Amino acid sequence: MNGRFFCPCVNCCNATRLELDVIREHLLCDGFLKNYTHWIWHGENVDIQSVSVETQTQTFTQEIDMDDRLEEMLRDVDPESFKRAHMYETICNDLEKPLYPNCTKFTRLSAILRLFNLKARNGWSDKSFTELLELLKEMLPEGNTLPNRNYEAKKVLCPMGLEYKKIHACPNDCMLYHGEFEGLHQCPRCGLSRYKKKQDDSDYDVSTKGPPAKVLWYLSIVPRLKRLFANADEAKLMRWHEDERKRDGSLRHPADCLQWKKIDSMFPNFGKEPRNVRLGLATDGMNPFGNLSIKHSSWPVLLTIYNLPLWLCMKRKYLMLSMMISGPRQPQTTLMFI
């Protein structure tokens, strides 16, 4: 496309289109992606019946928008970690099960991934997505395996680590209704209700349940860290700062800085364990609607893994979205770091 091709080096992982000269430089310096034996991103056809589960996942999801990285997520999952979590068989069944009898183009898993991709890109509500699934299930031939509810579709994706948790927040960003405050219905600091107030409800009771006034979306990082350590190659990279970092007094890596050494001195037991994870937090407001005339600020909270080599720390594959603080206005510091 326009003289650019997917780069199969170990860093780009067929996720970025580059010019041939740049690709050649990457391959000479970094080397080929190890498991990339079927060149499906460069025009090679693959016989689905004779390939492994990992390659099937690549084939079935290759039509998904590259920017969403869903096919990369599936490709990097270690089957052994799924076996330990008793989810491997479920994933394999959904991967191999046709969407309807004699269907050769879509499987149950690939169809759900494509539909969720559209849901995310177009901002469909859970209710509208459920209505779409119900309609599609009626339109498809008898015996189709498409779920007819948004909840059932999400259960298919949850084994891959796509689950999230909604945490209610005070409208004034005073607190999160989490932990010891989870049962409260009113902010103890400002007195505002946890729930939205109906415009026609003059006798509003703060203890009445309803839609939350403000929500924080939390994506647990523990399953993603477990997945990294479950893969032998990734686990080795997570110890790079201790095992392979050059120590000559120069400042090349966050592990060389004074702040890192100060934390090690304050918590010596933590510092002695090379598998302990060091994370950097970054956040900034963004307008999700792409319209400068709309004053809306949503705040994603990203985590960077500092254990990794310098050339991997800021790669999209290793950046973890841990929270999404929805607008319309920016959160206060007390909410962001509680």
Image (spheres, helix red, strand yellow):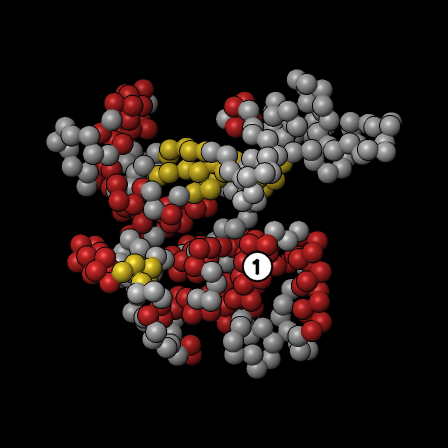
- The residue singled out by tag 1 in the image is 118
Residue 269 location in percent, x, y?
31, 26
Is 216 on the left-hand or right-hand side of 284? Answer: right
User: Toward the viewer: 261 or 43?
Assistant: 43
* Local SS, label 1: helix
Q: Quadrant of residue 222?
A: top left
Residue sitting at x 61%, y 22%: 174
Q: Is residue 10 above or below residue 298?
A: below
Q: Amino acid at mark 1?
A: Leu
Q: Is residue 271 above or below residue 315?
A: above
Residue sitting at x 48%, y 63%: 64
User: Toward the viewer: 83 or 133?
Assistant: 133
Residue sitting at x 71%, y 65%: 134
Is 187 on the left-hand or right-hand side of 241? Answer: right
Is 263 on the left-hand or right-hand side of 122? Answer: left
Q: Residue furthest top?
A: 189
Residue 48 location in percent, x, y?
42, 77
Residue 236 in sight here: yes
Residue 102 location in percent, x, y?
57, 82
Binning the other alpha carbons within 10 Å of mark 1 as few (below 14), some (14 to 19) or many (20 upward) gives some
Is 180 on the left-hand or right-hand side of 107? Answer: right
Q: Quadrant of the N terminus?
A: bottom left
Residue sitting at x 17%, y 58%: 28
